[in-house]
Image: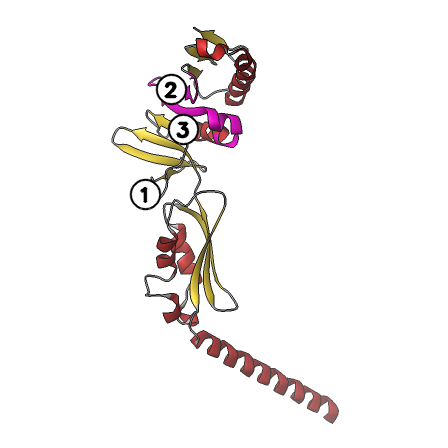
C-alpha cells in the first residue's frame, strides 16, 4: 500500500512540474514579440490587391509586426477581417514557430466584366459581384446589358463555362444581353457576331460552335460571315 501511495505521489508531482513548465513557457512565449509579417498569395491570379494593403490589415494598422506581442494576436479576428475584403476569397492566418505572422491569401477569380450604364464591376467565379481593381485589369469578356436576380445564376454558369474552356476563353471577348434575354457574343479575330439565344442548352451550343469553327477555319470561310446562329441545337446557321 505504501509503495502504491508513493507512486501516485511521484506521478502527481511530475504532472504538476510539467504543467508549471508548460504554463511558464506559454507565458514567456506570449510575452515575446513577433519578428515580422508576411503575405503569401496562392493561385494563378495576378495581384488584384496589393500585398501592402493585406499587410496593413494583417498587423491591424500597427507600425510593423515587431511591435506586436504574440499574445495580442487574434488570428480568428484577422482572418474574418481579411475574408470580408472585396478582392479576397479566403485567407489563412497563423504564427510560425520562428515568430512570423503569416497570411496565406486566395484572391477572387473574375470571369466577366459587367458594364451597366454608369456602373462597372466584375462577376467572380462564385457568381458574386467583385469591384474593379486599380492594380490590374482582368482579360475577361465585357458584358453589357441588365443582370438581375432572375438571370444572374444562369449567366454566371455561362461565364464559368467560357472561363474554364481554353478556346472559348480566348475567342469570346464580349457579350451583349438583349432586352428579351437572348445573348449576342463577339469574337476576337473575326467580324461576325454569334446569336446565342437564351441561356439554354449552353454546353450543346458551344460544342456546335467549336465543331463549326474548327472546320470553317481551315478554308478561311470565317471571314465571309456576318452572323453565326447557335439558337438551333441541331445545326449552326451562318449568314453572309
**Badge 3 local density, few (<14 within 10 Å), some, or many (20+)?**
many
Residue range highlighted in magenta: 163-190
Q: Secondary structure at mark 3?
A: loop
Give the SS element for disc 2: loop
Q: Residue at x 36, y 45 (%)?
A: 86
Is the residue 235 above or below the residue 115 in the image? above
How far across and down, in percent of the image, does residue 135 sit?
A: 35, 44
State which quarter of the image contains the N terminus.
bottom right
**Residue 134, disc:** 1
Q: Quadrant of residue 70?
A: bottom left
Disc 2 marks which residue?
181
Mark 2 or mark 1, which is nearer to you? Answer: 1
Q: What separation in Å lies between label 2 and label 1 (alpha carbons)?
A: 32 Å
Q: Are marks 3 and 1 in contact (CB under 8 Å)?
A: no
Which comes before the other along the chain, label 3 or label 1? 1
Q: Nearer the viewer, residue 150 or 237?
A: 237
Type of colouring:
secondary structure
Mark number displayed over residue 141: 3
Q: Disc 3 vs disc 2: Cβ atoms closer than 8 Å?
A: no
Q: Is residue 1 visible?
A: no
Indicate yes or no whether the magenta region holds residue 176.
yes
The image position of residue 74, as x and y in percent, is 41, 64
Q: Residue at x 40, y 36 (%)?
A: 138
Q: Which quarter of the rendered picture does the C terminus lie within?
A: top left
Residue 190 position (above or below residue 38): above
Question: Sequence order check: which comes first, mark 2 or mark 1?
Answer: 1
Q: Secondary structure at mark 1?
A: loop
Whether residue 140 is visible: yes
State how far apart marks 3 and 1 are (Cα). Answer: 18 Å
Residue at the outermost bottom position: 2
Q: Residue furthest top?
A: 240
Whichever of callouts 3 and 2 sits on the residue coming sooner in the sequence is 3
Amino acid at each position: 500500500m505504501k509503495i502504491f501511495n508513493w507512486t501516485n505521489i511521484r506521478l502527481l508531482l511530475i504532472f504538476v512540474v510539467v504543467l508549471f513548465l508548460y504554463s511558464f513557457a506559454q507565458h514567456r512565449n506570449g510575452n515575446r514579440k513577433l519578428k515580422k509579417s508576411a503575405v503569401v498569395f496562392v493561385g494563378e491570379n495576378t495581384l488584384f490587391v496589393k500585398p501592402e494593403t493585406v499587410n496593413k490589415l494583417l498587423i491591424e494598422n500597427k507600425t510593423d509586426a515587431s511591435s506586436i506581442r504574440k499574445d495580442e494576436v487574434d488570428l480568428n479576428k484577422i482572418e474574418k477581417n481579411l475574408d470580408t475584403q472585396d478582392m479576397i476569397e479566403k485567407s489563412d492566418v497563423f504564427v510560425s514557430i520562428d515568430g512570423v505572422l503569416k497570411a496565406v491569401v486566395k484572391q477572387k477569380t473574375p470571369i466577366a466584366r459587367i458594364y451597366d450604364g454608369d456602373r462597372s464591376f466584375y462577376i467572380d467565379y462564385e457568381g458574386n459581384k467583385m469591384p474593379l481593381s486599380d492594380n490590374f485589369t482582368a482579360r475577361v469578356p465585357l458584358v453589357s446589358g441588365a443582370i438581375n436576380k432572375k438571370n444572374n445564376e444562369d449567366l454566371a454558369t455561362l461565364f464559368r463555362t467560357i472561363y474554364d474552356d481554353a478556346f472559348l476563353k480566348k475567342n469570346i471577348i464580349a457579350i451583349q444581353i438583349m432586352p428579351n434575354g437572348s445573348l449576342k457574343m463577339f469574337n476576337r479575330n473575326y467580324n461576325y457576331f454569334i446569336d446565342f439565344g437564351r441561356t439554354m442548352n449552353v454546353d450543346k451550343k458551344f460544342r456546335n460552335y467549336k465543331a463549326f469553327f474548327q472546320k470553317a477555319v481551315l478554308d478561311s470561310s470565317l471571314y465571309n460571315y456576318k452572323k453565326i446562329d447557335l439558337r438551333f441545337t441541331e445545326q449552326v446557321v451562318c449568314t453572309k
